[in-house]
Image: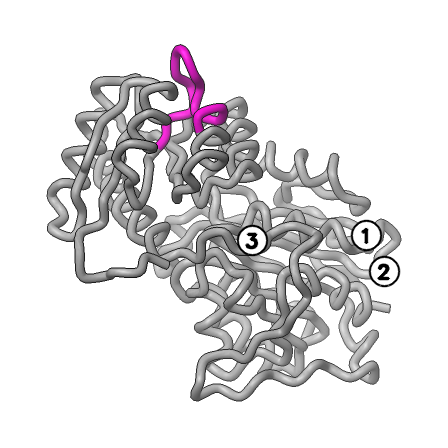
Amino acid sequence: MLQNQTRKLRVLVVDDSSFMRMVIRSVLEKDPAIEVVGIAVDGMEGVEKALALKPDLITMDIEMPRLDGISALKQVMAKCPTRVLMVSTLTCEGAKATFDALDAGAIDYIPKNVTDSADAQRVFREELLRKVKGAASSIFGRPMTTSAPRTIITPPRQVQPAPRPSQALAGKFHYVGIGASTGGPVALQEVLGRIPGNYPHGIVVAIHMPKAFTGPYAERLNSKCSLQIKEANDGDIIQPGVVLVAPGGRHMALARQGNSIAVRTLSTAECPQYIYIPSVDHMMTTLADATNGSALGVILTGMGSDGFKGMKHLKSKGGITIVQDEATSTIYGMPRACIEGGVADTVLPLTQIGSEIARLGG
């Protein structure tokens, strides 16, 4: 987290498009809490200015001449570690490059979706400001790999640490729901990578991503984990050892279908009350109802409080909950909401969550 929250947030903008440089700079400079301290037209200049200006945050395009965004990001992380927000195209290739950037240390990403549409421009402006400010408040340089420390920390002062579920709870659920946002792509890979392929329960995931990203992300996870992982389609049945990732741009609901639980995908127009897409609250709430509480809910790193209402509903139905701790969360918003709201049965470091899911599911 930035040490001095009273001064302006200093941002370096790196993009080979003069139009995007103008748009990003214009949006950021209208906020009195942000100062654009520099502009770079490619990755090589971006690295040079990062070293010279030492900004608090860098917005980094991915496709650039001389030195691309991912190569520039790696140099920045090696020479002067800085929070980096990637600016990504809404394509399959853009999605894959974005996930590579997150693996290399980027805090978050924003889809490059500036068109002639007034609505698209408004969404981009709002998303850019929200993610820049969110990245500025993120925990930077935290352990995120399998070698991360396994120390459990105490939640905020007024909240007592959540106890670890006893072995008696093992096998008390038949489904798992996981929600995440900022920092989630890397965190979710860590969690799912620790669950064996013969896991006896089905898993559903809602992570805030645009439409073009969830398919490539599911494929990426599937290639790295023992579980079978795919983007969910309307009508899919939850099955043991299979992870269904909510499709970007839509909401995912779960519904009882005979002796099974089926996926229902809904347009954003059908669920206008949800700001974040796909909604973790909606997925978790419908999972709780469809399973009559026979589910384990998990909330990982993320901005805001999406997931708290769903976890609260799951708890009221008799479900079990796990929440990521502050020390390993990129953004503590979603976990904090659950912990301070009293709906976390367990608070664990990222590297222990997958093992705990496996242990309780035995």
Amino acid at pointer 2: Pro
Is 5 one of the magenta-colored residues? no
Is 64 one of the magenta-colored residues? yes
In the rendered image, the vertical position of residue 213 relative to residue 107, given as above or below: above
Give percent across and percent down for residue 113: 33, 30
Q: Which residue is more in the foreground, 69 or 44?
A: 44
Mark 1 → mark 2, Cα distance in angstroms? 6 Å
In the rendered image, the vertical position of residue 178 relative to residue 335, given as above or below: above
Mark 2 → mark 3, Cα distance in angstroms? 20 Å
Range drawn in magenta: 60-72
Pointer 3 residue = 206
Q: Earlier in the sequence, mark 2 or mark 3?
A: 2
In the rendered image, the vertical position of residue 81 relative to residue 16, given as above or below: below
Quadrant of the snapshot with the C terminus: bottom right
Instruction: Determine which of the numbered discs, if any, sits on residue 200 in the image.
Output: 2
Q: Please name the residue shown 39% across and 42% down the image.
A: 82
Amino acid at pointer 1: Gly
Q: Earlier in the sequence, mark 1 or mark 2?
A: 2
Give percent across and percent down for residue 308: 48, 71
Give percent across and percent down for residue 269: 37, 49
Residue 256 visible from this viewpoint: no
Amino acid at pointer 3: Ala
